[in-house]
Image (spheres, helix red, strand yellow):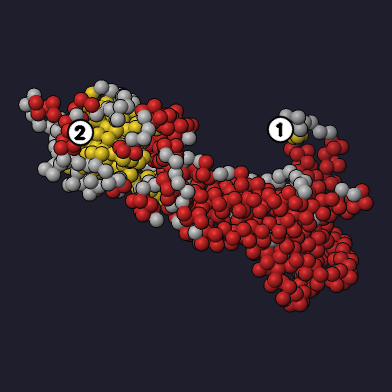
């Protein structure tokens, strides 16, 4: 059976060390007896182990492997892969300028390549890499010990940029794998089915996971094997200035957040008194949307320092998991910050233009009452659009509607003086708690201000729905059918002559009065739906503000490489391998030239739409086409349209009481420690990663 070997190498690997004899560390990912992936994490000088013995190396490898993710440890173990000799040429011969020590070392490769300074055989696999001046990357495999056999053939060399937190990483997860990009044909070719039946030759998940853990493995290995000296950067002037700036910023934000916390805590304590309990119950019913968004904002103010410090990215070995944890840490405070910025923009605009907004609201209320409601009711009492209605019923419905509108207009005159202060209240709430709370308060105010429209719509809907139900029941009587509510079906039934006579007497006036009732029902349905549409539009804007991932958008604008979605291979060249087996030469067998493919590992990246769509899909999860169809059918049968979209909002969290001093300390510690975690993470990368890797990542 043909053996397949793929070697995954970090770029600029040979330039990381000036020594001619180095050791390779990484993972052997064995998928089967004939398929092997060698993932090289880093390279180190062989003299690096001169101060440690074989047992200490085994301990360091074991402890480094324990720091890796559990899914990676189940598939492969971090180990010593083999040796890299830069003093040897690509064909396995020593160059002309090689020293005697190099020649002696090379002569011992055929019998002792598993031994490293007294260390015995470490695994059933061992790889030997050599220098190749003809290759752009300057490194190739000479041979590999594979379960006791020596293999000189390598199918693929894949070079990758080492993943670094905050820079880039690799991921196999696609944005939407379930929905194809193009429409599939009605009948698939046979070769497509055969392709899906084949087992994959390479388990990419384990390989990509090990590549994402390469930088953390190198840092952990170097920290465990040697005692890193304290960098002088920590005591530099720039470090002290940045530390002082972060401390001042943490103090400012902690004080501001503590002020919000004390204000919210005061309202919670005030609502616990019995004298204010009825006020709280009434306000929750009248200002339902405001209370929901106020609770969401209260939970965000309480929990954002907890979310900011609960995940330590430096303790996560996989760069992909560290990126996801960082986005989760910054999601709460970024959403709250953007909401407050929008609230301040809207609130300041309202404060500086309160008089103009007040005049516009009064003018709009007057036009809506006189030109739409009153004129519409008078028009319906006559001959609307040429329809001949029942004059008496139209007069009764019109007079009742006009009286309700007049009563509400009279009350509106007394409440007009409070509109100015309501506009100020909306502005103050936007500045204090953000745009979502002020927008929710506007929804509640609109709902309360149009209460007379809602009442008239409810009354005419009640009349219209009962009239439709009575006509449907009488129609079933004439057909000899009866509704069976237990089995939810129509059964045959024999009605008496008296029942048919009474049904005929009731069916005729109800049918003739239906156009008059329908006209009033359509008018108030359109009016109520228009008001509800405005509220739904504001509710939609509130849900968009809550659902938008602002942290991901800001990071995507700065560095798009942090959002990969799938990998692809850029082939550099595809040529014959010049390495030949020494055993074949000794046996004078025909010279074999296996094929070698050299490629680079690349990533696809998410677009801004692909980042936003999953969040917005979750927001609209409660709305479906069937629900819209049901609502439309309900209007025809006399049911009211829903006044809310039912969009998904952030889930409420339980309120926790803590002393104000403790909350301030929590906020200050989370901000300051978060800044130190980021600087320490960057510092550890500079210590652990080679110079070439640092330059490439920068």
> Of all residues shown, which one is farthest toward the left?
588
Q: Measured from the top left, where is residue 610 in percent x and y? A: 48, 51
User: Relative to the observer, which residue lies in front, 469 or 675?
Assistant: 675
Res 216 label: none
Coordinates of residue 144 in the picture (x, y in percent): 25, 30
Task: Quickly name the residue at label 1.
Answer: 489
Spatial separation of the CA atoms under disc 2 and disc 1? 92 Å
Q: Is residue 391 visible?
A: no
Q: Along the line of sight, which residue is nearer the eye, 179 or 519? A: 179
Name the residue at 64% across, 64% down: 341
Q: Nearer the viewer, mark 2 or mark 1?
A: 2
Give the residue at the far top of this rendering: 148
Q: Which class describes the residues within 10 Å of circle 1: few (<14), some (14-19), or many (20+)?
A: few
Residue 190 position in % (x across, y down): 31, 33
User: Looking at the picture, does residue 640 appear above or below residue 194?
Assistant: below
Q: Quadrant of the N terminus?
A: top left
Q: Quadrant of the C terminus?
A: bottom left
Farthest residue in the front direction? 51
Question: Residue at image x 85%, y 46%?
Answer: 505
The residue depicted at 66 percent of the width and 59 percent of the height is 251
Tag 1 secondary structure: strand
Residue 327 vs residue 657: left or right? left
Task: Say which residue appears at 20% left-offset and 25% top-offset.
Answer: 111
Q: Secondary structure at mark 2?
A: helix
Q: Quadrant of residue 17?
A: top left
**Mark 2: few, some, or many residues within 10 Å (few <14, many ≥20)?**
some
Which residue is labeled 2 in the image? 105
* Residue 54, picture quadrant: top left
Q: Can I make out residue 96 in this image?
A: yes
Q: How many marks?
A: 2
> Relative to 219, is 40 on the left or the right?
left
Q: Could you tell which of marks 2 and 1 lies nearer the N-terminus? A: 2
């Amino acid at each position: 059976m043909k053996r397949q070997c793929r070697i995954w190498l970090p770029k600029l690997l040979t330039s990381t060390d000036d020594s001619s004899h180095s050791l390779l560390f990484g993972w052997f990912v064995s998928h089967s007896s004939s398929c092997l992936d060698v993932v090289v994490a880093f390279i180190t000088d062989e003299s690096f182990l001169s101060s440690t013995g074989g047992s200490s190396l085994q301990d360091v490898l074991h402890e480094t492997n324990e720091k890796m993710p559990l899914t990676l440890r189940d598939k492969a173990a971090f180990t010593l892969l083999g040796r890299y000799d830069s003093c040897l040429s690509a064909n396995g011969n020593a160059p002309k300028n090689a020293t005697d020590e190099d020649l002696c070392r090379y002569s011992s490769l055929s019998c002792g390549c598993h031994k490293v300074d007294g260390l015995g055989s470490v695994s059933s696999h061992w790889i030997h890499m050599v220098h190749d001046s003809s290759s752009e990357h300057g490194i190739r495999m000479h041979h590999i010990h594979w379960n006791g056999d020596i293999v000189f053939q390598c199918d693929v060399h894949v070079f990758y940029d080492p993943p670094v937190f905050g820079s880039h990483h690799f991921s196999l997860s696609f944005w939407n794998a379930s929905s194809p990009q193009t429409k599939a044909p009605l009948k698939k070719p046979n070769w497509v089915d055969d392709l899906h039946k084949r087992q994959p030759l390479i388990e990419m998940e384990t390989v990509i996971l090990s590549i994402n853990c390469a930088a953390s493995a190198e840092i952990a290995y170097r920290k465990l094997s040697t005692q890193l000296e304290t960098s002088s950067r920590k005591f530099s002037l720039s470090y002290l200035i940045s530390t002082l700036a972060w401390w001042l910023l943490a103090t400012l934000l902690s004080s501001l957040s503590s002020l919000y916390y004390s204000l919210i805590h005061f309202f919670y304590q005030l609502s616990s008194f019995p004298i204010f309990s009825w006020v709280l119950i009434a306000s929750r019913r009248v200002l339902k949307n405001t209370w929901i968004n106020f609770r969401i904002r209260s939970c965000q103010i309480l929990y954002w320092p907890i979310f900011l410090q609960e995940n330590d990215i430096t303790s996560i070995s996989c760069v992909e998991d560290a990126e996801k944890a960082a986005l989760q840490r910054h999601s709460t405070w970024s959403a709250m910050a953007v909401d407050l910025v929008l609230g301040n923009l809207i609130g300041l605009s309202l404060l500086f233009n309160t008089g103009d907004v007040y005049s516009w609201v009064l003018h709009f209320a007057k036009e809506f009452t006189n030109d739409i409601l009153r004129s519409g009711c008078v028009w319906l009492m006559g001959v609307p659009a040429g329809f001949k209605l029942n004059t008496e019923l139209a007069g009764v419905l019109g007079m009742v509607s006009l009286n309700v509108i007049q009563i509400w207009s009279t009350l509106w005159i007394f409440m007009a003086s409070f509109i100015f202060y309501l506009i100020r209240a909306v502005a103050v709430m936007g500045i204090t708690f953000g745009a979502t709370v002020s927008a929710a308060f506007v929804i509640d105010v609109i709902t309360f201000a149009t209460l007379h429209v809602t009442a008239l719509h409810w009354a005419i809907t009640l009349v219209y729905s009962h009239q439709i139900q009575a006509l449907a029941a009488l129609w079933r009587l004439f057909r000899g059918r009866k509704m069976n509510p237990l089995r939810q079906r129509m059964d045959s039934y024999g009605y008496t002559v008296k029942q048919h006579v009474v049904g005929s007497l009731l069916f005729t006036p109800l049918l003739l009065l239906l156009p008059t009732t329908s006209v009033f029902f359509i008018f108030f349905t359109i009016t109520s739906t228009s008001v509800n549409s405005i509220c739904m539009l504001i509710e939609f804007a509130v849900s968009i503000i809550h659902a938008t991932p602002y942290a991901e958008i800001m990071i995507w604008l700065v560095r798009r490489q942090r959002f990969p979605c799938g990998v692809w291979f850029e082939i550099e060249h595809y040529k014959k391998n010049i390495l030949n087996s020494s055993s074949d030469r000794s046996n004078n067998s025909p010279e074999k030239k296996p094929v070698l493919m050299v490629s680079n590992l690349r990533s696809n990246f998410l677009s801004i739409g692909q980042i936003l769509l999953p969040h917005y899909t979750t927001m609209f999860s409660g709305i479906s086409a069937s629900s819209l169809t049901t609502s439309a059918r309900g209007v025809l049968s006399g049911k009211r349209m829903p006044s809310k979209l039912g969009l998904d909002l952030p889930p409420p969290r339980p309120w926790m009481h803590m002393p104000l001093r403790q909350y301030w300390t929590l906020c200050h510690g989370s901000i300051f420690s978060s800044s130190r975690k980021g600087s320490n993470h960057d510092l550890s990368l500079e210590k652990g990663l080679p110079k070439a890797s640092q330059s490439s990542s920068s």
